[in-house]
Amino acid sequence: MPQPRRIAYQGEPGSNSHMVCQREYPELESVPCASFEDVFAAVEGIDGAEPTADLAMIPIDNSLAGRVADIHHFLPGSSLHIIAEHFLRIRFHLMALPGVALEDVRTVHSHVHALGQCRKVIREHGLTPVISGDTAGAAREIAEAGDPTMAAISPPMAASIYGLDVLAEDIEDEDHNTTRFVVLSREFVQAPAGNGPVVTSFIFNVRNIPAALYKALGGFATNGVNMTKLESYMVGGHFTATQFLAEVDGHPDDIGLKHALEELAFFTTDVKILGVYPASPERA
């Protein structure tokens, strides 16, 4: 695999995705994209265009909000592969123009999910919430507006990028708000077996008939394989077949998982391994 140089993420500079890119891959150029679709296109290339990034950093699950729905729909049809996972404890700061005091603020701007995760501080100070498209983008909007009555709820990194003062730190209602990110690559880079904990992600289709899923997954139970994720989708808008995204602990070369995948293939169609990658120490 050629040495990667650029990593794409969805959001504006200072977003949580940007933060985890900088933390885990400081040697790479972080490339902001307006949408998840743009992130996938940047790494895959589209309509014959050359890719503009080597890797993608994508949020896939959040401990409060659950799965990131768009990503679970992009992954099955993508040609990209999962090569790593990272976890980020989500932190939000309340920030405003330099010199502004908290009592001067009247409105607070952020993504709808961030506003919902910081209800206590909004209510405590009698602020009017205003929805923005992005948490880091809210900080940029405050800086550009120049209005001392406006504040943003944004990740800590956004304050330094957009020249804002932090009025209150770590204002989220829950301190266990964590997002799991996966790193996507055009190349299938499989973690070696026998070198620490490994996660295997895969998709498969079953016919929508009684006991189809039970039979498909039976081999994981009988072979002692721990399944940590199972998400379902309708295929092509029809109710006659269902597609699943699953994750299990273990390497396909492990004898238990090897037998479980063989049994899975017997009861399903279109089994596709999305990635075999090291389990993050933060998974625990």
Image (cartoon, rainbow, N blue to C red):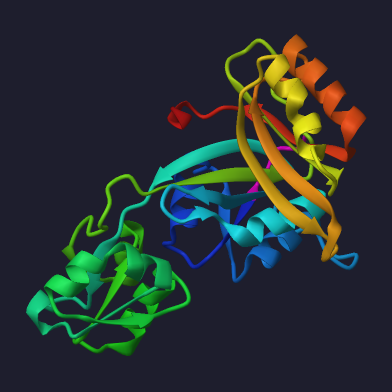
Quadrant in the picture for residue 184 = top right
What x and y, as percent, mark residue 161? Answer: 36, 65
What x and y, as percent, mark residue 204? Answer: 82, 41
**Could you tell me which residue is drawn at 73 percent across and 58 percent down?**
74
Is 158 one of the magenta-colored residues?
no
What x and y, as percent, mark residue 44? Answer: 79, 55
What x and y, as percent, mark residue 138? Answer: 38, 76
**Could you tell me which residue is drawn at 43 percent across and 74 percent down?**
137
Picture mark count: 0
Q: Residue furthest toward the front?
A: 210
**Could you tell me which residue is drawn at 74 percent across and 18 percent down?**
257
Can you see residue 272? yes
Q: Indicate the quadrant containing the C terminus: top left, top right, bottom left or bottom right.
A: top left
**Quick check: 210 left or right of 177?**
right
Name the main secondary structure of what is drawn in magenta.
Answer: loop
Q: Is residue 268 above or below residue 55?
A: above
Q: Nearer the viewer, residue 198 or 203?
A: 203
Quadrant in the picture for residue 42 = bottom right
**Could you tell me which residue is drawn at 44 percent across and 31 percent down?**
282
Q: Is residue 136 above or below residue 180?
A: below
Quadrant in the picture for residue 103 = bottom left
**Quick check: 32 left or right of 240?**
left
**Quick check: 160 left or right of 21?**
left
**Quick check: 185 left or right of 179?**
right
Can you see residue 166? no
Q: Is residue 276 above or below residue 221?
A: below
Is 2 one of the magenta-colored residues?
yes
Q: Is residue 261 above or below residue 211?
A: above
Q: Nearer the viewer, residue 211 or 185?
A: 211
Q: Indicate the quadrant containing the N terminus: top left, top right, bottom left or bottom right.
A: top right
Range drawn in magenta: 1-6
